[in-house]
Amino acid sequence: MRSCSARRHLGWPGYESQVRISEALIRSGKRSEDWAEFAGTAEENPKIDRAEFAVLVREYPEGSIALQEEIYASLLQPGAGLAFPEWRDGSHVIDGFEVPKHWHWGAGFDWGYHDPSVFVLCAVGEESHVVVMRERKWTQTDGMQIGSDIADLCIEARVRPDWIASDSSIWGVPAKKGYGNMAEDVSLGIIGRWRQRGMTDPPPVLAAVPKGPESRITRAGLLHRYLRVPVAKDGQALAPRLLFLRSCTYCVSSIPKLPPDPRKPEDVDTTSDDHAYDALTYFLLSRGPIVEAPSVAPAFNENRHPGFEPHEVDGMTPLGDPATVRTRKPWENQQPEDPGPPWRQGERLEPLGW
């Protein structure tokens, strides 16, 4: 039996988990016939006035998680109502990671003044694997100071990102009007601090990520693919492409809680705390496309030349049955004419006529 959700709001945090356990046992047939699962809402209670219930429902956004849980007492599955239900702390958050020497480094940056500016530093490996290693957040900070802090972070981490992917809007109006745009301010801050600390390698550079009518939906779809947890043939969960160090607290706390846009469910709600999400997806979008490895082995030898037919390899079928040897074509039996020794081949050449 499923009770209403009132006790959850009276300070009993174990209520929902106990109901879920009982629900799972009933569905699996591990409870006796005395147990049954059914659900009802306050709307079905004859003691509650329908008009009053309708007024209560109108206080909640239509289709919201709060409406389903608090009014209709629904027990939603983990991740329901979130923009990225694939997120699992146990799969995507790790305590530490030793970056292999052959991996590359990249970064993403989202600009804001009253809203936070966010920088994420990522290690990039094979098969589109990405680990978010460092993060930094600023509020009400000018571009020069942000650039200086980014340079310090990279130097202290002893890495130089190949590029820092950023929203193309920070390039704004070119400096021909007599003042620099935000991208120029951040770049100058990076360059100045890089030289000030005696670095001889070229400093990291900002790279603009183009924006279009559906670019936000593209970024959201890309993050879905990076967060997906693959499953092996034996049913064991494998590591996802995207991991976060637990020390990146802003990313770990904000990205899993992002709600979808109520008008565009494929996108993230832009009124939410999406700044770490923006910085990260700018970087992911600046990388090459994800290439999925084939899940089915080739029907025949994958190392054979593509010009051969599957039934014709070295004159025999894959089974090697002598009775099925391919008959050689007439021109395959012809031998090339002997051209003679190299010092005599010139005698066969015809004069050019001049």
Image: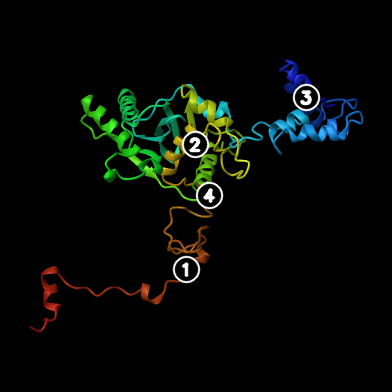
Query: Is 338 placed left or right of 250 in the picture?
Result: left
Query: Is 19 placed left or right of 111 in the picture?
Result: right
**Residue at the disc numbered 4:** 297
Would you identify the image quadrant in which residue 195 lies? top left
Type of amino acid at the residue the image marks with label 1: Arg
Q: Which scheme is used to colour this image of the protein?
A: rainbow
Mark 4 and 3 residues: CB-CB less than 8 Å, in contact?
no
In the rendered structure, find residue 5 and report the number of the disc placed on it. 3
Residue 163 visible in the shown view:
no
List x then y, in percent, for residue 254: 53, 28
**Among numbered discs 3 and 2, the one appearing first in the sequence:** 3
C-alpha separation, residue under disc 4 versus residue under disc 3: 50 Å
Mark 4 and 2 residues: CB-CB less than 8 Å, in contact?
no
**Among numbered discs 3 and 1, the one appearing first in the sequence:** 3
In the rendered structure, find residue 326 and report the number of the disc placed on it. 1
**Among numbered discs 1 and 4, the one appearing first in the sequence:** 4
**Among numbered discs 1 and 2, the one appearing first in the sequence:** 2
Mark 3 secondary-structure assignment: loop
**Among numbered discs 4 and 3, the one appearing first in the sequence:** 3
Q: Is residue 156 above or below residue 61?
A: above
Type of amino acid at the residue the image marks with label 2: Arg
